[in-house]
Each structure stands twice: as structure tokens, then as C-alpha cells.
Image (spheres, rainbow, N blue to C red):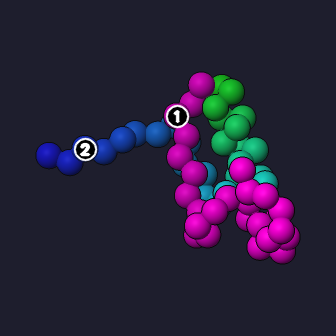
Amino acid sequence: MENREIYDVTIIGAGCAGLFAANYAGLRGMKTKVIDFLPKTGGSVAVFYPEKKNL
């Protein structure tokens, strides 16, 4: 039997809008999953401004 977790919200993209959506869903008490292609969060900000620190 597989162990599958169930999420209230799945967000595709960990850019500014995706992270805001995850934050808002968390404030509403929703179990949230964020999926992104890049290995770190930040979306285009992380790509175009690599000198910025990624927390």
C-alpha cells in the first residue's frame, strides 16, 4: 500500500506569486505543496539577480 499525502492546495511555481499564494493558503490553515523546476525558490528574481540572498 502506497503512502500518499493529501494536500488542500498544490502550487506550481516557486516565484513571487507562488510563494505569496503558499503563504496565504498557510494563513488559511491549508496544507500546501509547492512544486518548482528550479532547485531554489524565487523564480525569475533568483535567475536575474543571483547576488540576492535566497532565504
**Does 38 appear above or below 21?**
below
Where is residue 28 shown, x and y percent of the image?
66, 26
Which residue is located at x 83 percent, y 68 percent? Answer: 51
Q: Nearer the viewer, residue 43 or 11?
A: 43
Within the magenta stretch, is there residue 49? yes
Which residue is located at x 68 percent, y 27 percent? Answer: 27
State the SS at label 1: loop
Circles 1 and 2: CB atoms closer than 8 Å: no
Query: Could you tell me the amino acid type at mark 2?
Result: Asn
Q: Nearer the viewer, residue 46 or 33?
A: 46
Where is residue 37 shown, x and y percent of the image?
58, 69
Q: Who comes first in sequence, dot 1 or dot 2? A: 2
Tell me the residue that label 2 is attached to.
Answer: 3
The overriding secondary structure of the stretch rendered in magenta is loop
**Does 33 appear above or below 31?**
below
Where is residue 13 shown, x and y percent of the image?
65, 60
Quarter-of-image position of residue 36: bottom right
**Does 44 appear above or below 9?**
below
Residue range in magenta is: 29-55
**Real-space Cα distance between discs 1 and 2?**
16 Å
